[in-house]
Amino acid sequence: MNYASFYSEYFPFWDQLSEEDKTYLCNHSTTVYFDKEQAVHNNNECSGLFIVKNGRLRLYMLSDEGKEITLYRLSAGDICMLSASCVLQSITFDVYVDAEEPSECYMIEGCAFNTLSEKIPAVKIYALETAVSRFSDVMWVMQQIMFMSMDKRLAIFLLDESVSIGNPMITLTHEQIARHLGTAREVVSRLLKHFASDGILEVSRKGIVILDSKKLRSIAS
Amino acid sequence: MNYASFYSEYFPFWDQLSEEDKTYLCNHSTTVYFDKEQAVHNNNECSGLFIVKNGRLRLYMLSDEGKEITLYRLSAGDICMLSASCVLQSITFDVYVDAEEPSECYMIEGCAFNTLSEKIPAVKIYALETAVSRFSDVMWVMQQIMFMSMDKRLAIFLLDESVSIGNPMITLTHEQIARHLGTAREVVSRLLKHFASDGILEVSRKGIVILDSKKLRSIAS
C-alpha cells in the first residue's frame, strides 16, 4: 500500500514533514480489516489512529452494567483520534469503538504519531483540532439526551440513519436502535408503533421503512 | 494591573512570545468583576477568555425550555476557554457562563488571543489542550447522567460541593441543586429526606449539613 500518496492528500500538515518523518509515519502504518460488530478499540489503552477507508465505525461509551450510548459514527474519510490516547493525554475518559459494517482502515501506531506531534506543532494542532471538533458532536448528543423527548431523538436517529445508508429502509433491530439511544427496547418498539399508526413509517420483519419523511422531520425539528 | 507578571507565571507559552506580543496581550486584557449570579457569557458569541482570580464561575448548557445542566465550575486559577469561540472555531455548541459567587477575572479579548494563536503554534496548542481537557470533564458529567442513578449523582454533587467550599454545611437551595443536576426540585427534596432518615445529613432552613461523609461516599462510589 502506498500510504504516502494517500496521506499527502489527507493530512493538512504533510508538507511540513521532512522526508524522514514521512517515511517514519508510513512505516508505522498498516491496513486493518474489521468484521461487522468486531471491536476496534475497547478501553483507554492506546490502539492507535484509524482512518476509515470503507465501512463504518461507531464510537460509544459503556457503563459497568453494559448500557451503551453512541457518541458518533465514522465513515469513509473520517479519522478516529480518541482511540489514540497516548496522543491525547488530556482525554481521560474511556471510549469504545466497534465496526458497524465490515470496514477497512489505515491504522497509524499511536506512539509513532505522538513522536511526530511532539516534534512538529502542526501535527499536534491537527490532533487536538480533530478532538475538539468531536467535542461538538458529543455535546449535541448530550443536548439530545438532556433536553429532548425520546420521540424527537428517535425521529432524528431514523432520519440520520436513512441519510447515512442512502435508503428509506432501515434494517436495524429495535434492540440495536435502543442501544444507540441508551434506552430500553420496549420504549423504541412503543414509539415505532406510535409512528406507524400515524402513517409515518411501516414496521415489518425486514425492517423499518420511512413512508412520510416530511412528518418525521417535523417531529425531529 | 501588571498583567505581564501574572501571565509570565500562568501561561506555559509566555517565554515564546516576543516583547511586542507580550505587550499586545497585556494591552488587550482588562480586569472584570461579576456579582453573584451575573451572566459572564450568554451565547455562542465571543466574550473572550476569563482567568478566575477570585470567586467561582459555572459553565452550563441551557435548553429552549430553560432547563440547565452544569458542565463544570471554574475556581481561582482556572481559565475559561469555551467562551472565546473565535479562538476555538470548531466548538459549535452554545455554552453559558454565570458567576456563582462574586468573582474577579482577568479578561483577554478573544480576537487578540486568536491573532497570537494563529501566529504562534504554542499559543494555539495551549488553547486546544485546555479545551480538550474540559472535554473529559464533560464526558464525566455525561456518564453520570446516562449511567448513574440520581441518588449517586446527588451524593457526588454534595461531596464535591462540600470540598469545593471547604465546609460540611451546603447553603444551596433544593431548587439550585436540582438545576445543577438537570432534574426536578421534588426529586432532590425526596432524596435529601431519604439521606436524612439514614442519618447521612441534616436538612434545615439554613442548609444541608453532611453528618456521615463516609456513608455518603459509599453511595457515591
Image (cartoon, coloured by chain):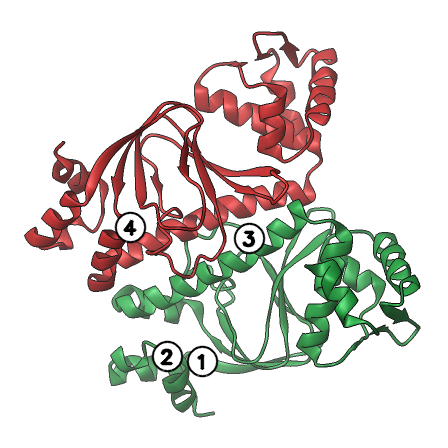
Chain colours: A green, B red
For the residues tagged 2 and 3, is the chain the same? yes
For the residues tagged 4 and 3, is the chain the same? no
What amino acid is found at the position of numbered circle 1 in the picture? Ser
Mark identifier at residue A29: 1
Distance (Cα) linking label 2 and label 3: 32 Å
Distance (Cα) linking label 4 and label 3: 22 Å
Q: Nearer the viewer, residue A191 or A32?
A: A191
Judge left or right: residue B11 versus residue A127: left
Distance (Cα) linking label 3 and label 1: 31 Å
Residue at (70, 54) in percent of width and height: A68
The mark closer to the camera, 2 or 3, is 3
How many numbered marks, from 0 up?
4
Query: Upstream in the sequence, badge 2 or badge 3?
Result: 2
Asked if residue A164 is positioned above or below residue B195 in the image, the reply reads below
Residue B118 falls in image quadrant: bottom left
Mark identifier at residue A139: 3
Judging from the image, mark 2 belongs to the subunit labelled A
Label 4 Cα crowd, 10 Å radius (few <14 / some 14-19 / many 20+): many
Q: Nearer the viewer, residue A48 or A67?
A: A67
What amino acid is found at the position of numbered circle 2 in the picture? Leu
Residue underneath mark 2: A25
Secondary structure type for disc 4? helix
Q: Position of residue B136 (x, y in %)?
A: 49, 48
The mark closer to the camera, 2 or 4, is 4
Label 1 Cα crowd, 10 Å radius (few <14 / some 14-19 / many 20+): many
Can residue A97 be seen in this snapshot? Answer: yes
Q: Are marks 2 and 1 in contact (CB under 8 Å)?
A: yes
Residue underneath mark 4: B110
What amino acid is found at the position of numbered circle 4 in the picture? Gly
